[in-house]
Amino acid sequence: MAFLPSAHALFEDAEARRAILELRQRFDASAQENAQMRRSLLDLQAQIETLRGDLAQLRGQNEQLAREASEIQRTQNDLAQGVDERLSRFEPGEVQVDGLRFIAQPQERNDFEVALEQFRAGNFAAARKSFAAFINTYKQSGYLPSARFWLANTQYADRDYKNAVQNYRAVVNAGPQHEKAPEAALSLANCQLELKDSKSARQTLEALLRDYPSSDAAATGKSLLNSLK
């Protein structure tokens, strides 16, 4: 005789199968959620990597922009400096020559420098002509004492002692603020000696020692004065 399960046993088997099915469904749902979570994490990681790449690119662009901005600023500064330099060629400006400060016109400054360069090159004839023209052209120039000093030097070299005396004396009379005054006084005394005017030369040397006792010219002048006694 065949064994038939009881109704209670069948009920238990059905409950067990249902429980198993529910567990499987839950497991499958959990697996899907986990898979979805993994996909989401992978997507998030990919987005993070993309953002990192974008950030690196932006940093590179910012650095490039900063370099370009710096280059533009340098270019602007160079242009501004160039404009200022060009304008300075046409505008008066302060100069300092032989201890004196004054305002000079661009052409005035250029003419003096050209004459001085001729003298330094040993072209005394051209320098004499240039300094004489400068003195006649710029009668109120702050360069005048210096121009007269260098003109006197060209005259001294040419043995034109009489005119050299006038110009050296003008430098001495410019006052102690002029750095060439001691040297001009010594040269003035030498010209006076060349003109056989020992009395004036002695007076010039005595004034040199009195007014500029610490100058190099005074040391030479002292020896020259002693030789006149």
Image (cartoon, rainbow, N blue to C red):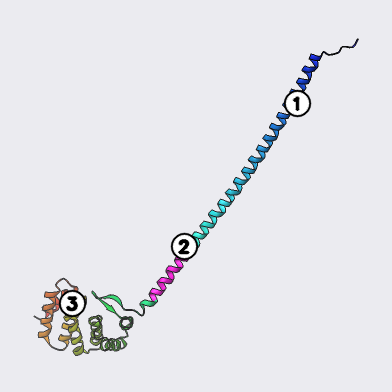
Give the residue pinned by disc 1: 21
| Gap between marks 3 and 2 measured at Cα | 52 Å
The numbered mark, 3 or 2, whose residue comes first in the sequence reads 2
Q: Element type at marker 3?
A: helix
The residue located at (58%, 49%) in the rendering is 51
Give the residue pinned by disc 3: 182
Looking at the rendered structure, the kind of residue marked 3 is: Pro
Residue found at the very far front of the displayed protein: 7
| Gap between marks 3 and 1 measured at Cα | 121 Å
Give the residue pinned by disc 2: 70
| Gap between marks 2 and 1 measured at Cα | 72 Å
Residue 154 position within the rendered picture, expressed as x and y whole percent measured from the top left: 26, 86
The numbered mark, 3 or 1, whose residue comes first in the sequence reads 1
Residue 160 position by quadrant: bottom left
Looking at the rendered structure, the kind of residue marked 1 is: Leu
Q: Does residue 90 appear left or right of residue 168 in this picture?
A: right
Q: Does residue 82 appear left or right of residue 107 in this picture?
A: right
The numbered mark, 2 or 1, whose residue comes first in the sequence reads 1
